[in-house]
Image: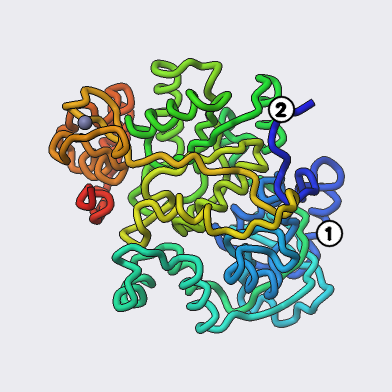
Amino acid sequence: MSKLVPPHGGKGLVCSLLEGSARADELKKAAGLPKVEISARVKGDLIMMGIGGFSPLNGFMTKADWKSVCDKFTLADGTFWPVPVVLDASKAETDAVKVGDEVALMRKGEVYATMKVTEKFSLTAAEKKWECEKIYKGAGEDSGDAKFWTIAEADHPGVKMVMEQKEVCLAGPVKVLSEGDYPQKYKDVYKRPAELRAELDKRGWATVAALQLRNPMHRSHEYLAKIAVEVCDGVVIHSLIGNLKPGDIPAEVRVKAIDTLVEKYFVKQNVIQAGYPLDMRYAGPREALLHALFRQNYGMNRLIVGRDHAGVGDFYGMFEAQDIFDRIPVTGDKAKDLLCQPLKIDWTFYCKKCDGMASLRTCPHEKEDRVILSGTKLRKMLSDGSEIPDHFGREEVLVILRAYYASLTEKVEVKMQGAASGAKM
Ligand SMILES: [Zn+2]
């Protein structure tokens, strides 16, 4: 009997992936269907629906769902959901498509899914702007009323993605036919929710924390994971293996660095490394909620939320992603509510005076005594070839990162913002 938290939505894991002969038959049918080219974001969303990571979603949202998610944090039926999951398509490809038709969802020549269209709608520029303000506009300096729309379309990758969506949205249930190259490319870390749950059950864990990771794992991440190990049965270092913004470190390099850290600095029976196939939306607080939601589907009931979770630039307040968990609707119905709770941890760093890892809650010293460890700052220093201060990262990890930067033919531009430079501490 599993002691793990149940999947979100009260329907168990909702997996839309077809396999074996069912998949082969559907692929044959797909060849004769109208083709719709999908974005990288939609591909990630589809794979999550395929493997149960987005339970209870079994398809793309209707306009009523989209509106309710933006406005109330729930699907139209009242089930908690923090960010829109919509399928955008070009007008040319969908002009002849009617409600009730089936379409094949394609990316770069590969069929990812078929979908039965239950609704066809459009989002006006004003509606997209409204969505961006609901989902991506935080309490940080870059989100100030005078500033947000002057910079967001260029500087906020999530806003850019929404504003550049194609003309038409299609809603309806999907049959997923591919997990992309994730199972092959990341065969040791790519795990479906059912596979990870089986591993957690085998260990007998009940209280499981997720460490969300999209940067290389440095000392402050290691510290966060170890705090979680102290108070939970174990921790899953759960890395994003989908797409990031340019300049970020690719997943294969990060996975290798984590392997090294786990090998040398963790008690192995208390930690699992895994990856999930989603792209970053950089929605800060709203994305932290999504991160918690799909962790629940993977069997984790705690999400470590530190400083500026899923943030970009200075669009969000430092701890806005922690506070939002106290503001979401709670119905009392476990099938509808988010059950994965945040493990809120303050800004962590190495402090020379404390002579160890500490946080703003435990260290009484000055900014100058602390080695501030943001991923952005580390990337900038590695990319410039500068000397990394002591206690910034583990030497074994830095060796891997240095080798990666040395292998790049083009120098990576890393933009420094106040949040990443430690200016706000
Ligand atoms: Zn200190």
Q: Secondary structure at mark 2?
A: helix
Q: Which of the two discs, 1 and 2, sits closer to the camera?
A: 2
Question: In the picture provided, is 4 more to the left or to the right than 342?
Answer: right
Pick whichever, 33 or 321, lies toward us.
Answer: 321
Q: Amino acid at mark 1?
A: Lys
Q: Give how far across and how far down residue 310 sits, in percent.
A: 43, 51
**On screen, residue 186 above or below 271:** below
Q: Is residue 272 visible?
A: no
Task: Write the residue at 32% across / 58% down.
Answer: 313
Q: Amino acid at mark 2?
A: Ala
Q: Give how far across and how far down residue 422 sits, in percent.
A: 22, 47
Question: In the picture provided, is 7 more to the left or to the right than 369?
Answer: right
Task: Write the residue at 45% across / 40% down.
Answer: 213
Task: Write the residue at 61% across / 76% down.
Answer: 90
Determine if the C-beta at disc 2 is less than 8 A from ligand 1: no
Pick whichever, 366 or 28, lies toward us.
Answer: 366
Pick whichever, 353 or 168, lies toward us.
Answer: 353
Quarter holding residue 340: top right
Quarter holding residue 196: top right
**On screen, residue 289 above or below 261:** below
Q: Give how far across and how far down residue 290 sits, in percent.
A: 57, 52
Q: Give how far across and how far down residue 349 sits, in percent.
A: 28, 34
Q: Which mark is residue 29?
A: 1
Which residue is the site of mark 2? 198
Q: In whole angstroms, how far apart are the C-alphas of marks 1 and 2?
A: 33 Å
**On screen, residue 283 above or below 13:** below
What is the quadrant of the N terminus in the image?
A: top right
- 10 Å neighbourhood of mark 2: few (<14), some, or many (≥20)? some
Q: Is residue 138 visible?
A: yes
Q: Which mark is residue 160?
A: none
Task: Write the residue at 63% across / 73% down.
Answer: 67
Decide which of tag 1 and tag 2 comes sooner along the chain.
1
